[in-house]
Image (spheres, rainbow, N blue to C red):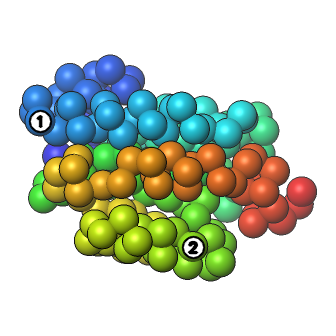
């Protein structure tokens, strides 16, 4: 699945094969346990999205909520999108260094960390990365705050 038409997280998870569903649910639990106040879980862009509601920050370039993070099952891999880390080069450097220190192979695009099996993803580090940037800091990357 590259993009889902599911309108709820439960529907999205129900579409996944068992192995992927289990992995996505485990990563989701870590994200939710570490999610800063003010960031909400929704379905957007065909994946599970963690975003700043428009009521909190309406002045976006595309009139859509700012994506803080996301979680998706793609055709050949699963991915955690860490927009909060991508927005700060120093944090991105920290994340890459810490990831490599786990001994796991980092497969990262601009903001996405790709993985094919849950054991290839350092969940503690994902949780730490999610918790590292609070709402005000994240919004400061976009100005006006």
- Identify the disc placed on residue 40: none
Asked whether, in this view, residue 6 is left or right of residue 30, the answer is left
Q: Who's the residue at 42% across and 31% down the image?
A: 29
Q: Who's the residue at 12% across and 58% down the image?
A: 76
User: Helix, strand, or loop for circle 2?
Assistant: helix
Q: Which residue is mark 2?
A: 94
Q: Quadrant of the C terminus?
A: bottom right
Q: Does residue 83 lie above or below 57 as drawn? A: below
Q: Nearer the viewer, mark 1 or mark 2?
A: 2
Q: Is residue 6 visible?
A: yes
Asked whether, in this view, residue 141 is left or right of residue 39, the answer is right
Q: Who's the residue at 62% across and 71% down the image?
A: 91
Q: Does residue 17 lie above or below 95 as drawn? A: above
Q: Does residue 11 lie above or below 20 as drawn? A: above
Asked whether, in this view, residue 70 is left or right of residue 130, the answer is left
Q: Residue 79 location in percent, x, y?
A: 31, 55
- Of label 1 and label 2, which has the lower sequence position? 1
Q: Which residue is mark 1?
A: 19
* Distance in Å between CA atoms under marks 1 and 2: 30 Å
Q: Residue 51 location in percent, x, y?
A: 59, 43
User: Helix, strand, or loop for circle 1?
Assistant: helix
In the image, farthest residue toward the right: 145
Quarter of the view holding residue 23: top left
Local packing at callout 2 (Cα closer than 10 Å; few below 14, some 14-19, many 20+) is few
């Amino acid at each position: 699945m590259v993009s889902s038409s599911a309108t709820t997280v439960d529907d999205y998870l129900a579409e996944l094969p068992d192995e992927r569903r289990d992995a996505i649910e485990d990563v989701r639990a870590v994200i939710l346990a570490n999610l800063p106040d003010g960031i909400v879980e929704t379905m957007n862009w065909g994946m599970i999205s963690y975003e700043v509601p428009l009521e909190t920050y309406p002045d976006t370039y595309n009139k859509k909520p700012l994506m803080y993070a996301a979680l998706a099952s793609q055709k050949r891999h699963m991915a955690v999108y860490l927009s909060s880390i991508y927005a700060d080069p120093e944090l991105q450097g920290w994340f890459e260094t810490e990831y490599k220190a786990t001994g796991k192979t980092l497969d990262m695009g601009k903001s996405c960390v790709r993985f094919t099996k849950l054991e290839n993803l350092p969940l503690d580090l994902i949780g730490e990365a999610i918790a590292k940037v609070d709402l005000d800091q994240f919004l400061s990357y976009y100005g006006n705050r």
